[in-house]
Amino acid sequence: MNKMNLTLDEDAAAFREEVRAFLDAKLPPAMARAQRLTTTVFSEYELSHPWHEILARKGWAAPDWPVEHGGTGWDATRRYIFASEMERAATPYISPIGLHMVGPVLIKFGTAEQKKQFLPRILEAKDYWCQGFSEPGAGSDLASLKLRAVRQGDDYVLNGSKIWTTHAHVANWMIALVRTSDGPKPQAGISCLLVPMTAAGVQVRPIRTIGGDHEVNEVFFEDTRVPVENLVAAEGQGWAIAKYLLEFERGSVMAAASLRRSLNELLDRALAIDIDDPDIEYSLSRLGIDIDTLEMMELTMLSSLSRGEAPGAESSILKLRVSQLQQQVTEMALQLAGESALRWETHRAFHEICSTPDEDANKPALSRYLNTRANTIFGGSSEIQRTIIAKQLLKL
Amino acid sequence: MNKMNLTLDEDAAAFREEVRAFLDAKLPPAMARAQRLTTTVFSEYELSHPWHEILARKGWAAPDWPVEHGGTGWDATRRYIFASEMERAATPYISPIGLHMVGPVLIKFGTAEQKKQFLPRILEAKDYWCQGFSEPGAGSDLASLKLRAVRQGDDYVLNGSKIWTTHAHVANWMIALVRTSDGPKPQAGISCLLVPMTAAGVQVRPIRTIGGDHEVNEVFFEDTRVPVENLVAAEGQGWAIAKYLLEFERGSVMAAASLRRSLNELLDRALAIDIDDPDIEYSLSRLGIDIDTLEMMELTMLSSLSRGEAPGAESSILKLRVSQLQQQVTEMALQLAGESALRWETHRAFHEICSTPDEDANKPALSRYLNTRANTIFGGSSEIQRTIIAKQLLKL
Amino acid sequence: MDLLPAEEQLLLKESARRFLAEQYPKFREAPAARPGFSPAAWAGFADMGWLALALPESVGGFGGKMEDVVLISEQFGAALVVEPYLPVIISAQLIAKLGDDEQHAILDAVLAGTHLLALAVGETPRRAALEGIATRAAHSQGTWVLNGAKTAVRGGGLADTLLVLARLDGMGGFGLFMIDPDAPGVTRRAWQGADGADFADMEFRNVTMPPSALLGARRDILPHVEAALDRTAIALCADAVGAMKVLLAATVEYAKTRVQFGKPIGSFQALTHRMADMAVKQAEAEAILLLGALKAEAPSHERVRAVSAARVKIAECARFIGQQAVQLHGGMGVTEELPVGAYFKRLTVFELVLGDINFHLRRYAWVGRTGVLREGLLSVPEMRPEYAL
Amino acid sequence: MDLLPAEEQLLLKESARRFLAEQYPKFREAPAARPGFSPAAWAGFADMGWLALALPESVGGFGGKMEDVVLISEQFGAALVVEPYLPVIISAQLIAKLGDDEQHAILDAVLAGTHLLALAVGETPRRAALEGIATRAAHSQGTWVLNGAKTAVRGGGLADTLLVLARLDGMGGFGLFMIDPDAPGVTRRAWQGADGADFADMEFRNVTMPPSALLGARRDILPHVEAALDRTAIALCADAVGAMKVLLAATVEYAKTRVQFGKPIGSFQALTHRMADMAVKQAEAEAILLLGALKAEAPSHERVRAVSAARVKIAECARFIGQQAVQLHGGMGVTEELPVGAYFKRLTVFELVLGDINFHLRRYAWVGRTGVLREGLLSVPEMRPEYAL
């Protein structure tokens, strides 16, 4: 066999069959439908929690953790196959904060005590974490964060606020970046704390998204006391931890499978409604080609990861394209829905108020289109990604 | 009649008929065809010169000059109608340098002697002017120009070079911006000189355009002597003169009529070749709508001009859109031509080597597409226009 | 030829702007008995003369033109007005044009602001050829019997009288029927659009109507309805232009004050140039809106060219300006915390109604085949309004 | 699954890059006896083994795959090579695949670099269904008689033997004929494309050919020709990717050194972000090129999906990168003074040949109807090459 190829080897092919069989058997169709009708980035807790438990029972909840902490020991290709198959089957999204952020951070930086206390509960879906990085004045510019944590005896006392905190209203823990000191280099005064959301002085204010969903929040801290044992690594290490997470996340934006599922839904839809508009076919083909291209970029990155190479500005290219394509998919769905998407629904979840294939396709279309505008803003805006690409790749 | 309207009043309508009748009678069809097959911005001298003479005989060569110097006395609406009808009929373009730059500059800044010497010869097509503003190091940033003019007795002695000088190879005069002194404010050292192209030490190097045409040149000056009488206004007034020209040119980018003629040619072409591609119809409609929009912007500006209001950033919006649409028209022509446009022709003018409607449409398509890339660069690049719009209109 | 607004138009626009800025937020804050409708606001609209503006003098109107409606509509977009102004006045225009004296009687209450109308035409999720209408009325023993369904009728949930387009069974042609939405056999499900405006779906099952329910002669009704849809479309274009102007201004303002990396984001060139492109789109939208307004009552080919051109161009501008306004507002742009969200939704609704971009591109191309696109806009037309007011 | 090039592919690429960088400019500077062809360059290509690269070992080739041709072609684009490499090797592949031993004999001279081939298929200014071919061959008393015309045949002016696709008169089906372009009845008009490459239009009037001119069985010839066009298309995609890489690099370099308003223009954010977008397009072009290369010999649906996807995406990237490279070079970009002009022309030619973007969009949609688009790319295929080498 030629070295360059798109063919799964026998073992990997068998693994894919195993994953498919598992999903066939264990993913309830109603759960997949509910996920298809979700308009938010995260799945609602009611949807993701039971799925997390199913995965945990199978031992597949944390593929990227080391085996000793409950990981699966899969190589990069298997992890990619697993993630892609879940997208293909429309499983609920499990919140990444616990499994993909807190877990890796504690495994790398945490004390033995912290690992023991938190890792199993994350794995088994007993705790639900949120992430407190952004602040009202610090969006793309994280170094300027202000939430103050002052050491008083065995506690840090927190005052300030976080914003865009996904699912703060259901989480019982937050991993937060806080300012423990000032100085000429703002990055040096940032620390990482594990904050119980049940602590006194924590207040959660819902921020309704443009699509009408309650997914994110502003979180206020007023004299909130957090024990010093909840500090991760040393004071001032917050910036290093944030950078580690960023590195860790690099190459994890793999979305071709999810986009292809959306495209297939659009193709089905276009067939079902039989619009007299030749432009629709051109647009769907363009989208298909864009997704083929994205998948090739992902698989190339996967090939690099498999050889142990660290991705660079390629991650920014992927982030940029994925967010753009996610927006295009929702635009197309809206175009296909036409006036059927006009109606403003306040009830969530959508799967509870839709009862026909038409409604499944049309009712969530508008909220999804609106919410997806956020994809080019959060997680490093497209403008930030372009700056990274120009600097790192073009040396401009 | 309601105040807001798109209807020509009776006099203006009659004037339009008069212009149409004149063009019907006096514009040779071969001349119009030659113009349609031109791939350059200016028409070749051999094409424009006879047409200039025809207009001069009619007394219509310089509509925007004052009547006492040979202007027509038309109001803004008539000048617009006249220009539009010429576009519609595909008359050759008369080089604007003499009539629209040197004329107005001399009328405003020139001595009585200069006016007497130059204006009638411009009007009657006896002199042919080129313009020397840009230099290799000074493109968008005109203030940094370097061509040095040192006073020696009754002459200025010129050393340096100009670039992008359209038709320097046929012109007998150049209106040039030169540096007569250095200083902290570079603008203050710029003067305006009238330079005979026949003077010793003037050398013209052709610059072949990307489309294969010889339209622009680099012009070198080596100890070229120009009498001080050829200075326009005082030393150091060059920047003010350039700004006056810019003001004067504002609102003169009126291109809807020419674009509509091109669109009509595309519509004819699409009908003639009967391509099986529904996208073509969408694209042509989009182009039609863009041109309708442009025409409305032009007519709105004309309404303002008619009331004596000075255009502002609107000129930049027009420049931006006109150049983009000119490029789109050529892209569309190229798409319609397909492989018929592949062949590289070195012979100019095209009307001499085309002999069928197919050839008329296909042979010049590629050169025109390539050359038109310049439209978003010259005369203030699109980037410069965006900066002007942001600054002047949005106060950013 | 003059495209600058006349003094009285500037006055109309300024009085609308001021009234809506000063009064409308109060009306919206008061608890509404019916979603999408403030009686106080509506009474204000009547007092301002806006209900009478575009009706002929013969029925008590002021005889104004669509240009005036366009001016008002632009201010409605800027102020996010949700009341069903357009359905009421466009329906009233149809009654004035096509009705007899008896049928005109209803207009007094409409002008007084105590009676609402809606025009029920569409039956599919997108604008289509009217010839495809399936709702049908049968003539039987001196009465009409109506069967069928209509979707997404703007103002349909609030209307006291509906104008329903139906195929005339067994006799060819179509008719517009004036119907009481509470009549037996009518089912009406009202809902709110993403812009907060009232819409309704409705069904008709053996609804019996007297002969007087039929408006005007039946054979040439479709061109009148098509013209009414175009008048609605151009007024909605104006609404969108009003909304996008507010959005661009808000975005520029936000960019001047929002600081990231130690500088206002409005000083980053990439964003500055983006906003310049938004300004270009706004200028284009305003220009083509004016064409649509001036041609809203022109002969049908000219009207279709202008209205469909406006609809395409303004929808594209609305999408660009809306999406970029959200993007430049960053996180706050994708919430309901700032007005930017509401304006973006309004522009999105605008894109979805009365035919999408491709529908209007095809329509523009169709009229192009008549040759009407080949000439410039500055013509010497004899006004031959066929289906205008 | 592995998408990183193997060691020997990197070597092939690097040796091609070095040979072309060091040798090719000299070849081009030497006065050419025939436009678009340097005998010395061609001899070099033969020496490098590139002519044999993708031919089966049975006829003296190295048995390489299209991936290798793609690697070479990318370097040809980067070095602006004009010689008719693709027409020769793609035609040779067809002869190797379809010919008998007697017909294979010609390949020795081809491999030696002393005999050139060209594939004459198209008859209209754009790629169309092969079923529409009008050139026809009639069987008459033991010989074939050919009548018809072909346009824009790449390498057609240089070819020593032409492969001409023709309809078989009166018997259904199509045939590929090996023809001497100097035979009586053949008129050939050679010309140069905007990229400097050789093309020709040709006419056939009662050209008589022996039975041995017909290549292979006649009934299933079209799929082989279609596959050959696709192999050409993907190699041209590689050529375009090579050209766009040079263009982007040159633009970035220019932006770092060209000073305006006291700063290098590469420090203006709007331009920086534009170049970032160019880099994204380049990455996309490279990614989809790889798909096309890997699927160039796959079963036809998979091949069509991959090749048409590559053609669409790379044409769009080529246009964006080409136009922006010119724009960012300012005035110098629109002249023949800098190489940017030649690269832009090459990309423009690429867009025009072998089917435009819309043609390939329709082809992609067509194959989509077979369901092949609905699955991801990472498959467990059994290789069933139908019309491959």
Image (cartoon, coloured by chain):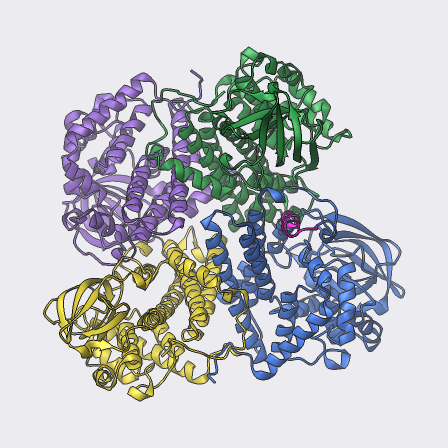
Chain colours: A blue, B purple, C green, D yellow
Look at the image and say whether residue A362 sits in the magenta stretch.
yes
State the image coordinates of residue C209 (x, y, percent, origin top left): 64, 23
Nearer the observer, C306 or C338 = C306
- Residue B120 in sight in this render: no
Look at the image and say whether residue D287 sits in the magenta stretch.
no
Relative to B3, is D356 above or below? below
Farthest residue to the left: give it: D184
- What number of labels is visible? 0
> Which residue range is magenta in the image?
A355-366
Nearer the observer, B3 or C346 = C346
Relative to A77, is C96 above or below? above
State the image coordinates of residue A38 (x, y, percent, origin top left): 69, 55
State the image coordinates of residue A70 (x, y, percent, origin top left): 76, 78
Relative to C29, is A263 above or below? below
Nearer the observer, A291 or C241 = A291
- Residue B159 in sight in this render: yes
With D16 as the anchor, is D110 left or right in this view?
left
